[in-house]
Amino acid sequence: MSYQEERLTVRGTSIQLLSGGSGEPLLYLHSAGGEVSWLPFFEQLARHYRVYVPAHPGFGQSEGLDKIDGMEDLVFHYTDLMDELELAQPYVVGLSLGAWLAAELAVRYSQRVRKLALVSAVGLRMPGHPIADIFAANPAETRRLLFADPDSSLAKTFIPEDPSPEVLSNVLKARAATARVGWNPYLCNPKLRERLYRVQVPTLIVWGEADRLVPRAHGDAYRDGIAGSQLVSIPDCGHALPFEKPQETVAALIQFFEP
């Protein structure tokens, strides 16, 4: 299935945007890995929805990181982006950092979201259940944190042991942009958990049973904090569900989104 890549100007900021498919709109908010390329996961989603994959400011080819000092700035950026795209009430899917962003968006603007899916979400402070330090991890450690089978060819393709200068540059750029919103406190908003009651939209939490980056307790807390939400576990899968188990992840999303 074909897709298009374009530059979108959002209140003076140039943003990289991929889009493809047809049907009801679905906005995907990417992780700290900055997965703004047309992955098999997006290809499968695009058979059912019109999929929009923007790069956050400072990731990929998007500009505007100088305007972002925290997660709240990203929330406002995305409400402006949704206005620019005329997305009145899309399905919203977020992965990891993007799931945290999606939760913060729904806490403030539930009326802007049709249904919400939080995949391997960070964002909560959970004493006794710390998120592993992704900033200090080398390639082998990163594969172990993200994939159920860190020695698989898939894991080594996404996170090579000896990355090219271009790949390394993109990794460092993504880490710098992530640090802008998630360095201190580390990948969380200490107030978010007590605000989850404000999410007034059907919500699905998706978790990999072999997630070594974010403990399952975080998924349980999201489920318990968002009224009426449900949590689905995917076996033999780590933190990077859309990469490692795209078909199973898409199936869970479609089952939840469809009436």
Image (cartoon, grey):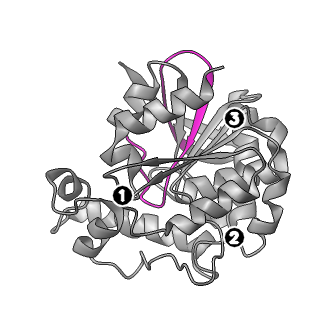
* Above or below: residue 193 compared with residue 98: below
Residue at the location (44% across, 52% down)?
A: 60
Residue of label 1: 238
Q: Which kind of residue does numbered mark 1 sit on?
A: Gly
Residue 109 as seen in the image, left or right of residue 66: right
Q: Do the CB atoms of the residues marked 2 and 3 lie less than 8 Å apart?
A: no
In percent of width and height, residue 1 lies at 35, 18
Q: Which kind of residue does numbered mark 2 sit on?
A: Asp
Residue of label 3: 115
CA gap between label 1 and label 3 equals: 24 Å
CA gap between label 2 and label 1 equals: 30 Å
Kind of element beneath mark 1: loop
Front-lying residue, 134 or 128:
128
Q: Is residue 122 visible to us here? A: no
Local crowd at mark 2 within 10 Å, few (<14), some, or many (≥20)? some
Residue 78 as seen in the image, left or right of residue 15: right
Residue 55 as seen in the image, left or right of residue 47: right
Residue at the location (57% across, 53% down)?
A: 98
* Above or below: residue 133 compared with residue 77: below
**Mark closer to the chain start, 2 or 1:** 2
Kind of element beneath mark 2: loop
Q: Which kind of residue does numbered mark 3 sit on?
A: Lys
User: What residue range appears in magenta?
Assistant: 16-38
Residue of label 2: 69
